[in-house]
Amino acid sequence: MRIEDKVNEIVELSILDVTDLSVEHLSYMFDVHILYNHQSNFYVQKAGVDIIGLKFDKRHEMFKAFCHEAGHMFLHATNQKEMPQTFNQLQEAEAEKFALLLQLPENLIIKNGWYEPIDLMKEFNVSEEVAIKRLQMLKSRAEVLQLQF
């Protein structure tokens, strides 16, 4: 399953509008415990319990980190400490893509007709660079699936 499809499936079950894009809401929906700390962001599973550690930071940075770590939770079943560096780099890239897709869900963008970078910047509190990257991803996906965008 492609990362886009996985994220869209998750979003369909847990995000109705932009107010649902928060650590609190998504941690509840994903049944994951949050461990706030001063050191690092991480994901671990202990005794069958999913735990995302979030380093104290600005709210939008913590949400971005949460989405990244959720990517590891949903996509990866390996311990990065035991894997080759190149494999870890691949997993980090996948988690970054997952985070971007989760932070700016396709269904909300399309449903609301937010097709300009300024729309995404305003609605999702992201930089212009992030907004443009997400719109380019949507355009590419539409071309591959032969959808109107």
Image: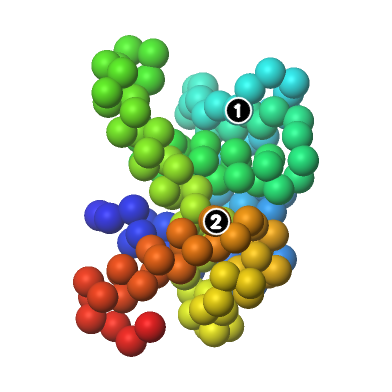
Q: Residue at x 64, y 35 (%)?
A: 33
Q: Position of residue 64 (x, y in %)?
A: 61, 45
- Classify 32 as above or below 4: above
Q: Position of residue 81 (x, y in %)?
A: 39, 13
Q: Residue at x 55, y 62 (%)?
A: 131
- Classify 113 as above or below 103: below
Residue 95 position by quadrant? top left
Which dot, 2 or 1, sits closer to the camera? 2
Q: Position of residue 86 (x, y in %)?
A: 27, 23
Q: Residue at x 76, y 30 (%)?
A: 56
Which quadrant holds the C terminus? bottom left
The residue that label 1 is drawn on is: 41
Q: Determine the secondary structure under disc 2.
A: helix
**Callout 2, which amino acid?**
Glu
Q: What colour scheme has been applied to the protein in the rendered image? A: rainbow
Res 59 visible: yes
Q: Who is closer to the viewer here, 33 or 82?
A: 82
- Mark 2 Cα-neighbour bin, 10 Å: few <14, some 14–19, many ≥20: few
Which quadrant holds the N terminus? bottom left
Mark 2 → mark 1, Cα distance in angstroms:
23 Å
Left of 13 or right of it: where is 6? left
Residue 94 position by quadrant? top left
The residue that label 2 is drawn on is: 129
- Classify 100 as above or below 114: above
